[in-house]
Image (tube, rainbow, N blue to C red):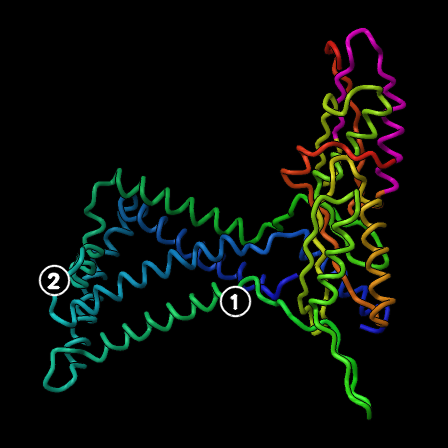
Amino acid sequence: MNSTNRPLNRLFIAVVGIIVLTVGLTAIALVTLEPVATLWSDAAPGVVDAVNASVIDTRIPNTVVSWVAVATLAGLLLLLVLLAVFIFRQGRGHTSRLITAPATGHGQVRIDSAVAEQSLSDVLSRKAELMSSHVTTYTVRGTSVLKISVTCRRGVAPPEVVGVVEESLSALEDLLGSPVPALLEINSGFRSRLSSATRLA
Amino acid sequence: MTTTTGTERLYSRLTRRETHSPRAAVAMTVAAIIIVALAYLGTELVLHLLGQPALLLEPSAMASTLVDAPSFVPAVMIGGGSIVGIIGIVLIIISVSPGQRSRHVVNSSNSAVVVDNAVIASALARHASYAAGVSPDNTVVSVGHRTALVEVTPASGIAVDVAAVQTAVTTQLDSYSLKPRVTAKVKISPSGKVGA
């Protein structure tokens, strides 16, 4: 429903997983496989020396600070910011605008999401089948979509809930004079398990 | 949006996303751990550049520790490496597995509908208990991706009509038009319960 970039999440987890697995396997190989240990002992000091040499070679004149260190720090910072952005990009996509009608010579009609959210919540709160409802609006591929999340009473069959909600939804569509795409999410939740069974047929 | 196919595509995207995990929790946790690790490395680097004492290890000490890795205690390296490797494998599995949520899609033309398996189970339990003539509290239903298991514990001395329960449950499931389809299996507990 939200605009979370799911393929990116999976790609990120996969890349980190591969790196972590490689580190683990390397650690095991270093103490169990003689050739790997020899290779490491032969190559590692050279790499460290090369890094040290480049750090000294790239010193900013009249200081002990090296460009390499500054660049590394900048790289760390950039990666840190990218990861923070990645975290904050999760779960977005709310919108406050439900319908924007094309402008005419007399003006333009815009309908806020709050109109639909509040009127639907109000209607649904009076339905015996439902314990609670929560209506939000998301933008999905440029279309405003209502997300109607309901918790139903114990033992209510899904078609009954769908019927009740879609009836309210079509009343709202008649009122607004425009189709309103919607996602209905029927949950059970802890409270509904404790609630008394409905008396509805 | 105005065309039917457009709405259908939108709805199929919505239901697909609602029935699968976004993997957001794992991705955010991993990202947060990496952020902490990077912040630590950056701090050590800055302290080193300022000529201040290190928090834990100087960058040069980190490098020499890595160089000396083959001489570490083998048991520690194997144990640590295995734990790290298993974490890596788990992350890779999480990234490629479908991440199916315990929800079903309800076919409906007017909106996209997803229903929690617990709701289906609770509705089936009510109808199964009516058909069996026992209290809903003595009917346990567990709904999986394609199967629903209905377990009825009868009242002592009163026989339960298995066929009636099976018919009731199947009729209900058919009327829900779930995707994927769910088939029910009814199990009557061999020993009854007093007052069930």
Q: Residue at x 43, y 55 (%)?
A: B30
The residue where tag 2 is placed is B53
**Amino acid under label 2?**
Pro
- Residue B34, by quadrant, is bottom left
Q: CA distance from mark 2 to mark 1?
A: 37 Å
Q: Is residue B155 magenta?
A: yes
Q: Chain of mark 2?
A: B
Q: Which residues are magenta?
A: B149-175
The residue where tag 1 is placed is A89
Q: Is residue B9 above or below residue A150?
A: below
Q: Pick the residue in front: A104 or A89.
A: A104
Q: Is residue A162 above or below residue B194?
A: below
**Amino acid under label 1?**
Arg
Q: Is residue B173 magenta?
A: yes
Q: Pick the residue in front: B148 or A195.
A: A195
Q: Position of residue A76 (x, y in %)?
A: 32, 69
Q: Position of residue A57 (x, y in %)?
A: 16, 80
Q: Residue at x 55, y 54 (%)?
A: B23
Q: Pick the residue in front: B12 or B137.
A: B137
The quarter of the picture where the N terminus of chain B appears is: bottom right
In the image: residue A167, left or right of residue A97: right
Q: Residue at x 70, y 51 (%)?
A: A133
Q: Position of residue B103 (x, y in %)?
A: 70, 45
Few, some or many residues within 10 Å of mark 1 (<14, 14–19, 20+): few
